[in-house]
Structure formats: structure tokens, C-alpha cells
Amino acid sequence: MCQSLGMPPDATTLARQARILVVEDEPAIATQIAHRLTAEGWLAETAHDGPAGVAAAARMRPDVMVLDVMLPGFDGLEVCRRVQADQDVAVLMLTARDAETDILVGLGVGADDYLTKPFSMRELVARIKALLRRTERLARLAGHSVDAPPTAPPAPQQLGDLTIDSAQRRVRRHGVEVHLTPTEFDLLAQLATSPRTVFSRERLLAEVWDWEDASGTRTVDSHIKALRRKLGADLLRTVHGVGYALEPTGESRPPVEG
């Protein structure tokens, strides 16, 4: 079952409105979220189970999907897998649990960010705005690259046994390709712009997630843990109370997919 909210007066207004899909099995919560998103000037649609969420995403082609993990039919992780296989969409996952494993699994299937219930509507809106800014920035960069004269693609970056190919968005360690989600790749690429330099969480949130206010979020920490599981813990150094640095030195075991 799906419900669409928002009252665009004409096609011109519709073209300017961001499309947000809320997949949440509790109708009262879904409706509350959708009304708040509509008040922000966005188009909002709701779905209340896994199959309906996938179908709504295929039809609506949302800019952002707010996705509860626990859903009837099939869960939010499966919704994320199926939708991401069909289209690029920013995903904000909602979880009632703060378990590290649950969060890492969600990020591993392509979610860009997560919120743990209960959460404030103000924080939810702030997260969606950040995802929209990031989506718009990437779209502008893609449009510019299409319009610009053809140039030679950048050479892969070799950092010890780590290879980062920005042109193809592929990563290898010890010659073995490692699958990263889009956000994981962007985070690694940002750290690789200045190896061994410590990046604060606030700077990473601004550069990778387009966050304006980084207070109270553990998103960077969770993505760093996901990268360590895939690439090896020795590559990423934690500076407690400050942030993280990429340390492309030393030898380690081949990466294991997390």
C-alpha cells in the first residue's frame, strides 16, 4: 500500500521538488514523517512493506529513500539491495537497534546514512538535506564532465599495496579487487587526497556527506569500521578525539569482504 503526499501546483513546480520515499511499516510514523517532508517543500510518498517499497521506488525514482530496517514482506536490507540494483538513490536507514553489526550490514548494502529510533524530525530533515546536497553536487559534477572536452582519465592512485582507480571507482589491495559501496569509496578517496594527514570527523562529514552540522553523529565511525573490515585495519589510523588518517604502509593479509 502506498500513499502520496504533496500538492504541486504545476509541472514546473513538480520538476523543482525533491522526491522522498518513506518506507515504514507503522502508518502513523510514516504519515508523520511524510507530512513534515511535505512541509519542507518536498514530494513525499509512503509505503508500508518491502514489496510495496521496491515497487514505489521503481515508479517514483526518488532522490532519497527513508527506509526502516524492520518491514513485513522482506526487510529494509533487501529493499535496499533491490532498489540499488536498479537505480542510484541516496538511502537513509531507520533502525530501532543500535547494534554495530546491524548498522554495518545496512551500510554494506548501500545505505548512505542511518538514524536510530527514536529520532527528532529536525535531525531527520537535516540528514535528508545533506543527502540532497550531496546528490545535487554529484549530479553537477557528472553534468560538467559530460559537457567538458574529453580529457585523459586520471591514472589510478597507487598507495603501497592499495590501488584507487577514481575513473572506474574501483579499489584493489594486494592486487585483489574489493567491492566498496559508493559512500565507502568516496570516504576512502577523500582520505587518499592527503595520505597520513588526519581528517577530522567534521571535515569528512562536510566533504563526503555535505553535512553542515556534524554534532552527535557516528556516521563516519561506522563507515570507517566497514572500510576496515574490507580493506584491513592497518590502513586506517584513528586519532582519538580528532579523526582518521589513511596510512598506506606495511604489509597485511589480503582483504576480506565484510
Image: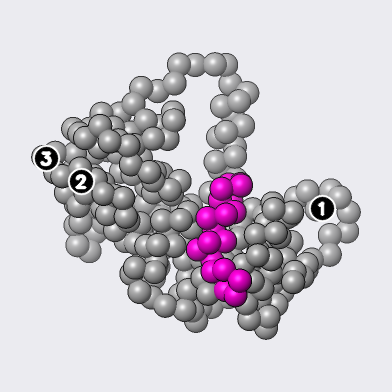
The residue shown at (52%, 55%) is 81
Q: Is residue 176 left or right of residue 186?
A: left
Residue that numbered label 1 is attached to: 13
Q: Position of residue 252 (x, y in %)?
A: 14, 43
Query: Circle 2 sits on which residue?
Result: 235
- Could you say which is closer to the camera, residue 2 or residue 183? 2
Q: Position of residue 50 (x, y in %)?
A: 61, 67
The magenta segment: 71-91
The way the protein has been coloured in the rendering is one colour
Instruction: Report the residue that reaches farthest toward the front.
Output: 73
Dot 3 and dot 2 residues touching (CB under 8 Å): no
Query: Which residue type does callout 3 highlight?
Result: Glu
**Residue in the picture at 48% in, 74% down:** 95
Say if 242 sits above or below 247 in the image.
below
Q: Amino acid at mark 2?
A: Leu
Read off the residue under disc 3.
251
For this orientation, the residue located farthest to the right is 10
Query: Helix, strand or loop at disc 2?
Result: helix
Report the quarter where the C terminus lies. Answer: bottom left
**Callout 3: helix, strand or loop?**
loop
Q: Amino acid at mark 1?
A: Thr
The Cα–Cα distance between marks 1 and 2, rounded to whole angstroms, is 47 Å
Is residue 213 among the parts visible in the rendering? no
Q: Which mark is residue 253?
A: none
Asked if 136 appears above or below 31 in the picture, the reply is: above
